[in-house]
Amino acid sequence: MGYNEHEKVQVKKEFILMLARMELDPARTELLLGFFETYLKLNQDEEHTLEAEFQNSNETEANVMEIISSYRKEGRLEGRIEGRIEGRKEGKLEGRKEGKLEGKREAICAFLDSKFDSSSTPLQKEITSINELQTLDHILEKIFSTETLDEAKHTIESAMNKH
């Protein structure tokens, strides 16, 4: 575009002033600003510098303020969209983890119930409170070789103390 890296803020300021003087409708203004943004992106510090320059200058025409306001709204919208995407990713990961935990808990409880009947109910309640995959994995590795309820209880307690 023919500008130096240290001139980016000034170039953007002049572009916004030019847009304001052109008095275009909001759609065209946004289109041009979006196109301009594609080729000249400012980092957060530069954005703050640009805002400060507009606040400190006499260039507080209504059109300039409208463009800056629209620009801020667009930035907030992009931030919300990025936040939602990130939240969905985190939610999916958390859901997968919770699904794995639940599946392992159910397998252990089903074994205890089939092998020891209702006398294993207190142990099953303990199992449902475990929130560590490693602990449940350790229990699953050992629980199927237990012969008595006391052995099962010992296996569960030792796994909980390890992790």
Image (tube, rainbow, N blue to C red):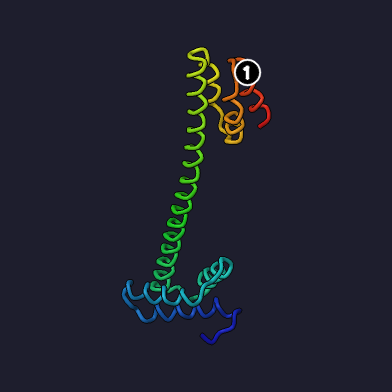
In the shown orientation, is residue 62 left or right of residue 105? Answer: left
Where, by quadrant of the figure, is residue 157 drawn? top right
Quick one: 27 or 105, which is closer to the camera?
A: 105
Residue 48 drawn at (x, y percent): 55, 67
Direction bottom: furthest residue: 2
Looking at the image, residue 22 lies above or below residue 27: below
In the picture, the quarter occupied by the C terminus is top right
The correct choice, above or below, for 46 with respect to 3 in the image is above
- Which residue sits at x=51%, y=85%? 1
Residue drawn at x 44%, y 52% is 84
Q: Which residue is mark 1?
A: 151
Where residue 158 appears, x then y in whole percent? 66, 25
Looking at the picture, does residue 15 appear above or below residue 102? below
Residue 8: name its quadrant: bottom right
Q: Tag 1: residue type?
A: Glu
Nearer the observer, 45 or 41 = 41
Q: List x then y, in percent, for residue 80.
A: 44, 55
**Residue at the spot x=42%, y=76% of the render?**
35
Q: Quadrant of residue 136?
A: top right
Q: Residue furthest right?
A: 162
41 left or right, relative to 81? right
Secondary structure of residue under mark 1:
helix
Q: Residue at x 47, y 49 (%)?
A: 87
Q: Position of residue 81 (x, y in %)?
A: 43, 57
Mark 1: give few (<14), some (14-19) or many (20+) Cα within 10 Å.
Answer: some
The number of discs equals: 1
